[in-house]
Amino acid sequence: MNKVIAIYPGSFDPPTNGHLDLIERGSKIFDELVVAILRNAEKDPLFSLAERRLMLQALTSHFKNVRVDTFEGLTVDYAAKVKASAVLRGIRALSDYEYELQMALMNRKLQPELETVFMMPAEQYSYVSSRLVREVAQLGGSITDLVPEMVEQRLREKLDPAIKLQNARKTRTGKRA
Ligand code: PNS
């Protein structure tokens, strides 16, 4: 029987516990799951593509059937490139539904063979989004329990000017930041 490959596309800026919850659920129902980070030149991301890729690779390395990649252009074209037959997306609340339905139907119009599969993350993550995590972290609030420890640490490094300065000095003197 053919392997069922799915892609999980998104910006992941930064990856949250909600994303990881969905990756774990997806890894259980698909033979192979490709976490696909959109390379979007228009947006001004907090984390570079390389940083997001490294974080996601480290956070998903224990899933043997999950890999991380980046893509640009249409999701349907990327899905065809990696021979995926499904797109995995998370729906947290009713408010997600309209946007997700539009995307799923547009993708179906572009590629009728590609199915979108919606999964619900655990309820404790139903209000967690990358945008809110960024905002709360930027304003000094706690994001513990909303993102993995590694992401919390990277956010702190990125947003705390003292740590930024320390890292810049280490880089200049050749030490690893
Ligand atoms: O989780 P996000 O950040 O809202 O992800 C949005 C994403 C990457 C799934 C969406 O923007 C996308 O698919 N972009 C690729 C361009 C595309 O295919 N557009 C037409 C389909 S709606």
Image: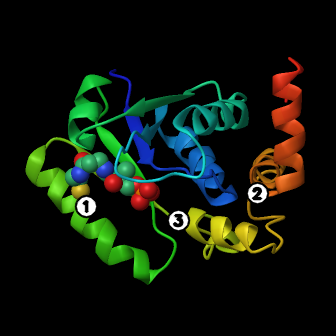
Image disc number at residue 120:
3
Image disc number at residue 103:
1
The quadrant holding residue 7 is top left
Q: What element carries label 2?
A: helix
In whole angstroms, how far apart are the C-alphas of marks 2 and 1?
Answer: 33 Å
Residue 92, relative to residue 177: is it above or below? below
The kind of residue tagged 2 is Leu
**Count of number-bearing discs:** 3
Viewer-nearest of discs 2 and 3: 2
Which residue is at a point 81% across and 64% down the rendered structure image? Answer: 145
Residue that label 2 marks: 159
Camera-side residue of 142 and 164 = 164
Residue 42, relative to residue 34: is it above or below? below
Whether pointer 2 and pointer 1 mark residues with C-beta atoms closer than 8 Å, the reply is no
Lateral position of residue 9 relative to residue 167, left or right: left
Q: What element carries label 3?
A: loop
